[in-house]
Amino acid sequence: MGTVLLSYLQGVCQSIKQRAEYIVTTGVSIALFYALYGFKVLNPLYIDWLLAGGDPTQHYLGWALYRYSPFRLRLGLMNTAAYPYDTSIIFTDSIPLMAVPCRFIGIFTDRQFQYFGIWGLACLVLMGICTCFLIKRFTDNKLLIILSSTLVTLSPCMLRRVFWHSSLGAHFVIIIGLILIAYRNEMCDTPVRSGVRWAFLAFICAFIHIYYLAMTGIILAGYILCVIIDIRKDHTSETYSSIALKLLVPSAAFLLAAVASIWFLGGFSSGMLSGAPGLGYYSFNLNGFFDPDGWSAFFKPLARYEDGQYEGFAYTGLGVLVMIISAIIVLGVSCIRKSDDRKLLNMIKDHSAFVSAMVFIFVITVIVSASNEMTFGDKLLFKYCIPGFIERIWSIFRASGRLIWPAVYVLATASIIILCRSIDHRGLALLIAMCVLLQIVEMKNIIKEKHTEFDTYTAYENRLDDDAMTRLMSQNRIKHIVFLDKDNLKQEELYAFTELATRYRLTVNDFYFARYLEYPVEETVYQNILYSGDDALYVLTGRPYDSDDIEDLASMFDIRYYQYGNVLIGFKRP
């Protein structure tokens, strides 16, 4: 018995040793999460921190409205946020990948709960693990792998999004796309395996945020370029049908999986406009790689051409910048060496397909993210006209600046790979460790600020929680909240009434969505007043009670209004 136990323990130790880099990286990612956000947000029952306003409140309330909506065949649809119409959980940015399974968990409890804290932790951990796997393709040194993944996980453009626009904190999907290129001969060696993997990536992206489909779509194009170069370098003859399968299967699988996932989530049946104004305004500024925008203790923010170019935030951090500069120097030195001593250039030549794919991804993401307005600092370099149909497609991703993120990770990982093949491992480990420390020191003020913000308990008090409203809701007479002029409500007023609706399982007729509703909301409101019963609470902005508008509505629809704080609420019966 003792021998068997000893043998088992030896096997466990060996398994741990083989996966040490992943275990250590997971621990480091958890430590980084604590340093930035603390652990209080991981409590599923602690929701007050999400109700302080802004995007996190939109995301949480979107999930809360979705949770209590009737089940649909397309699980992403709900009729509680734009009643009586169906809308999709996609357009509240509530992370369908978490919302759909958590909805089934919610069947077993009536308590309100959130998953955004756990999601934030998962983003950091998966970022570290995926980067580990990518770097391991180019070096077996576990210390280098751990340090490199830590440096990449400290990416400001990812950490900025976590708990601001939580679904856009999932930068690990970008790394997965790069992994499929780096490991294409092992993971995508047949058309079927390639198709399955790219389809799975499309599914994950669609269930997190639509913008990731555009980013990974560009990475897929880089993968196709890589395959084409591999085929040209391979001297074995292949049939045209075999080549066509290698190129078409992953592309078709990615597209079909993306369309199917969006359909399943109700994205095509939600009554939302696909595009929106803002293309060019929310673009990438060409100084974005060097603009810290408040994320550096050493450098000041740089000038922008448009205020909305914060969406193109692509600052790599000072530590990564040092790595990039070091890689450029090493490349330059390698170029001026004698031809028989150009090991690095020979390595690049041997991996020309991978290098070409990385260059392609970098160039395309810069062009697409900058939109049709190329800017540098506060200057417009040039603007070019695009056909209307291209503009309509491009406007689906109006915040085009976000699409620069693959370029950020191409720069970071490429610099690490170049240095891994050029510098002694001990010296490189010391360099990366110094860059990690530099990255942390540079962000020290942000780390302290975020830790204080998220690791301090906050208590949310809804302004509507008074005795009169409590008595009204306890009668169970009100089933719907109807905003007569939602666009004139202050955001905190809209969120207060919507939070009230989620607690008492009421519907609202409008909400703050990522896109504009095509449905005639105002016309529907008036029809609701004319033909519905007396189970609705009507909300108007804070106009004086004796205004002509109120008198007209009261006489037209037989509604009695009452002043309630800064707004007016009305009922069809007193």
Image: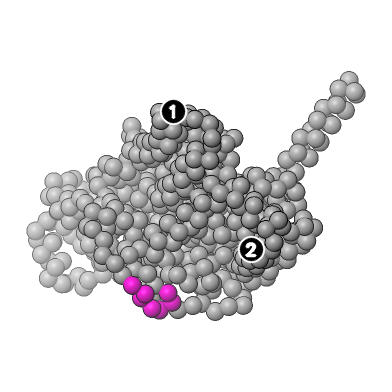
Residue 69 lies left or right of residue 360; in this view the side is left
Q: Is residue 34 visible?
A: no
Q: Residues within 10 Å of mark 2 (few under 14, many from 20)?
A: some
Work out whether 112 lies above or below 515.
above
**Compared to 266, does 361 lie above or below?**
below
Residue at the (13%, 61%) spot, across then down: 554
Q: According to the image, what is the colour scheme of the structure?
A: one colour
In the image, residue 452 sits, relative to residue 253, either above or below, namely: below
What SS does tag 1 mark? loop
Q: Residue 261 at x, y = what percent? A: 38, 38
Query: What amino acid is found at the position of numbered circle 2 in the picture?
Result: Cys
Residue 271 inside the magenta-drawn segment: no
Q: Which residue is mark 1?
A: 239
Residue 534 visible in the current orientation? yes
Q: Nearer the viewer, residue 201 or 372?
A: 372
The quadrant holding residue 463 is bottom left
Give the residue at x 67% y 47%.
138
Tell whether label 2 touches label 1 (CB within 8 Å): no
**Residue drawn at x 40%, y 61% as measured from the top left:** 367
Say whether residue 379 is magenta. yes
Q: In the image, residue 229 lies at what x, y percent?
A: 49, 43
Q: Amino acid at mark 1?
A: Thr
Indicate the quadrant containing the C terminus: top left, top right, bottom left or bottom right. Answer: bottom left
Determine which residue is flagged by label 2.
335
The overriding secondary structure of the stretch rendered in magenta is strand
* Total numbered badges shown on the rendered structure: 2
Figure quadrant of the N terminus: top right
Which residue is the extreme one toward the front?
Answer: 339
Q: Which residues are magenta?
A: 376-382
Question: How far, Cα to Cα, is label 1 from label 2?
Answer: 38 Å
